[in-house]
Image (tube, rainbow, N blue to C red):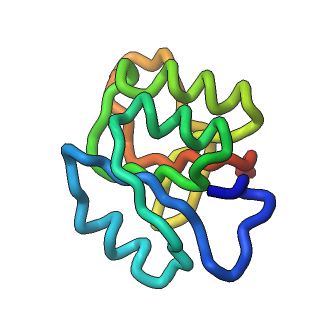
Amino acid sequence: MRPPETIGPEGYAVLASRSHPDPAIEAWLADKPVRQRVTAGSALKFCLVAEGAADLYPRFNPTREWDTAAGQAVLEGAGGSVVRFVDGIPGERLPVNKPDLFNGPFFASARALK
C-alpha cells in the first residue's frame, strides 16, 4: 500500500473491524473511493494508519478509552489524527481522560484533520 500522500484515483485503503462489522460504516463508504478494505484488531488498525499502510479507520460502533487511547497517542505522534465523527463529518479531536470512558463514533486518519 502507498502512503496517503500518494493516493491516486484508485482510492483509499480503509480499515474495518473484524469482530464488529457495521452497516453504518458500509453505508458511509458506499460513495467513497475505496481501493482496499483491511480487517484487523483495534490496536493494529491505529498502527497501520500511523505507518502509512492504511489511510482511514472510521469507527461508528462503541469503544472505550482503553480500546483507543494508546493507538490514538501513536497515531497523533506520527502526525495523524483521531477526531469525533459528528453528523457524517469529522469534527474535534477525540477526547481522552474523560469521566465517561465510552467513545462515540470517530475517524482516524494518517493526515491531521482540522
- Looking at the image, which residue sits at the far right? 5
Q: Residue at x 51, y 73 (%)?
A: 34
Q: Residue at x 45, y 19 (%)?
A: 98
**Residue 36 higher or lower than 50, as above or below:** below
**Residue 54 higher or lower than 33, as above or below:** above
**Residue 71 higher or lower than 109, as above or below:** above
Q: Quadrant of residue 62?
A: top left
**Residue 37 higher or lower than 16, as above or below:** below
Residue 33 placed where, x, y %? Answer: 55, 78
Horizontally, residue 89 falls left or right of residue 43, namely right
**Observer-nearest of 52 and 72:** 52
Q: Quadrant of residue 58?
A: bottom left
Q: Dividing the image into 4 quarters, which one contains the N terminus?
A: bottom right
Residue 31 placed where, x, y %? Answer: 47, 84
Number of marks in picture = 0
Residue 42 placed where, x, y %? Answer: 37, 34
Q: Residue at x 40, y 72 (%)?
A: 28
- Looking at the image, which residue sits at the far front? 1
Q: Residue at x 39, y 50 (%)?
A: 59
Residue 13 placed where, x, y %? Answer: 54, 61
Horizontally, residue 22 falls left or right of residue 96, namely left
Horizontally, residue 47 falls left or right of residue 103, namely right
